Image: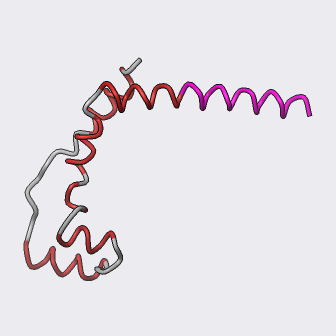
Amino acid sequence: MYFLGIDLASNSIKLSVFDRKRDRILKNTNYKNLRKQRYGSFDNGNGAKYEKGALSLEGLSEIARANGEPQQISGKQELFEQIIANTY
């Protein structure tokens, strides 16, 4: 029982620290805008249809074959990692 209490306290502290860091990231960085840009294709068109379940993977495959290779756009993964790692 004693160890369970220690684990619970440890996890509570970790969550508290995470909550504060998350709040600082959302308040003091452009994370929200970057995330909106990164997943913007799901806000309208075929991406939105897929997200809502109105378009299957087979349907997306047909669209991809008809349109060819998409323009390569950076997902800025390293930037997201740096924002999270360097926000105090």
Magenta portion: prevailing SS class = helix
Left or right position of 15 against 10: left
Q: Please name the residue shown 61% across and 28% down the image.
A: 14
Quarter of image, res 86: top left
Report if residue 21 lies within the magenta region. no
Quarter of image, res 3: top right
Q: Please name the residue shown 9% across and 65% down the image.
A: 69
Q: Is residue 12 shown above or below 72?
A: above
Name the colour scheme.
secondary structure
Q: Is residue 64 shown above or below 80?
A: below
Left or right position of 81 against 48: right
Left or right position of 67 against 42: left
The extreme right residue here reads 1
Segment colored magenta = 1-17
Report if residue 11 lies within the magenta region. yes
Q: Is residue 75 shown above or below 55?
A: above
Q: Position of residue 74 (x, y in %)?
A: 17, 45
Q: Is residue 37 shown above or below 69?
A: above
Q: Please name the residue shown 35% across and 77% down the image.
A: 53
Q: Position of residue 60 (x, y in %)?
A: 23, 76
Quarter of image, res 46: bottom left
Q: Please name the residue shown 24% across and 82% down the image.
A: 59
Q: Position of residue 20 (x, y in %)?
A: 50, 26
